[in-house]
Image: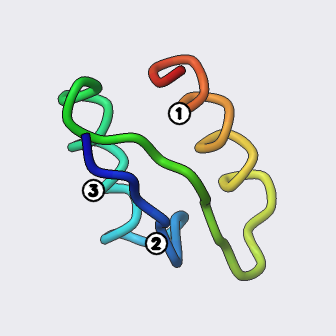
Amino acid sequence: MKQLTILGSTGSIGCSTLDVVRHNPDSFRVIALVAGKNVAAWRSSAWSSRRVMP
């Protein structure tokens, strides 16, 4: 299992990366999400990632 830190998690590449992680929960684990100013989107990403990955 690869552990990931996603920088810019609310941008297009960050969102795409999170989609890949959600579709492959046995292969990836997000250990950190970083966002600049979009706190609402970051919070949503953090909660949805937490539900998918232990």
The answer to which quarter of the image holds residue 26 is top left
User: Is disc 1 placed on a helix, strand or loop?
Assistant: helix
User: Is disc 3 placed on a helix, strand or loop?
Assistant: helix
Q: Which residue occupies 38% across, 52% down?
A: 3
Find disc 3 in the rendering and name its residue: 16
Q: Which residue occupies 25% across, 40% down?
A: 1
Q: Which residue occupies 46% across, 20% down?
A: 52
Q: Nearer the viewer, mark 1 or mark 2?
A: 1
Question: Foreground residue, 32 or 1?
Answer: 1
Q: Quadrant of the C terminus?
A: top right
Which amino acid lies under the numbered mark 3 shown in the image of this protein? Answer: Ser
Where residue 15 sits: x, y (%)?
38, 56
Q: Which of marks 3 and 1 is in front?
A: 1
Which amino acid lies under the numbered mark 2 shown in the image of this protein? Answer: Gly
Find disc 2 in the rendering and name its residue: 11
| Dot 3 or dot 2, earlier in sequence | 2
Q: What crowding class fits label 3: few (fewer than 14 Cα within 10 Å), some (14-19), or many (20 or more)?
A: few
State how many labels appear.
Answer: 3
Find disc 1 in the rendering and name its residue: 49
Q: What crowding class fits label 1: few (fewer than 14 Cα within 10 Å), some (14-19), or many (20 or more)?
A: many
Where residue 38 sits: x, y (%)?
73, 68
| Dot 3 or dot 1, earlier in sequence | 3
Whether the residues at callouts 3 and 1 have beta carbons within 8 Å, the answer is no
